[in-house]
Amino acid sequence: MIELSENTKDIIRKLYHKKRIGGKHTEEKNCLKWIKNLSREKHKLVLEEWQECIKEELILREIKTGEFHVSLNPRKLKAIHEIID
């Protein structure tokens, strides 16, 4: 299990509550707008953790309409529940 900051958990929590799971997705830039008001250090940390979540396949990332779109991996929902609770 990867250790995430509260800000990264907030992004994952928002994706979960908006039901962006599996085939339903949103643009990655929309998710990263949610952290625009963080300090430079926290912003950098969240981006590193975001990449780690993609590497661990908690977040699925595909190119659609020329942009990266993301959704939560339906096969990893148990791990996602552990993270956001």
Image: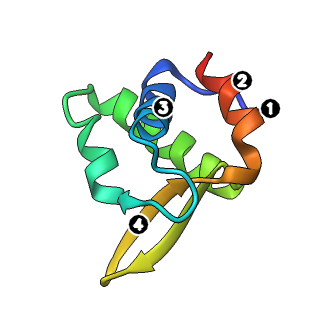
**Residue 60 point in image, percent of width and height:** 58, 61
Disc 3 versus disc 4: nearer the observer: 4
Q: Are marks 1 and 2 in contact (CB under 8 Å)?
A: yes
Q: Secondary structure at mark 2?
A: helix
- Above/below status of 81 relative to 65: above
Indicate the amino acid at tag 1: Met
Compared to 55, does 47 lie above or below? Answer: above
Looking at the picture, which amino acid does disc 3 mark? Answer: Thr
Q: Position of residue 19 (x, y in %)?
A: 46, 43
The residue located at (43%, 33%) in the rendering is: 17
Residue 82, image quadrant: top right
> Would residue 75 be found to the left or right of residue 45 on screen?
right
Residue, disc 4 = 69
Query: How far apart are the alpha carbons under marks 3 and 2?
Result: 14 Å
Label placed on residue 8: 3
Which is nearer the N-term, disc 3 or disc 4?
3
Residue under the image location 46 percent in, 60 percent down: 24
Kindly state the secondary structure of the residue where label 4 is placed. Answer: strand
- Closer to the camera in the image, 78 or 33: 78
**CA distance separating discs 3 and 4:** 17 Å
Looking at the picture, the colour scheme in use is rainbow
- Find the distance from the CA under tag 1 to the CA under tag 2: 9 Å
Q: Mark 1 to mark 4: distance in Å?
A: 24 Å
- Real-space CA distance between mark 4 and mark 2, rounded to the nearest whole angstrom: 24 Å
Q: Amino acid at mark 4?
A: His
Q: Which residue matches tag 2?
A: 82
Q: Earlier in the sequence, mark 3 or mark 2?
A: 3
> Counting residues from the N terminus, which is met first, the one under dot 1 or under dot 2?
1
Quarter occupied by residue 47: top left
Residue closest to the eye, 80 or 48: 80
Tell us which disc is closer to us: 1 or 4.
4
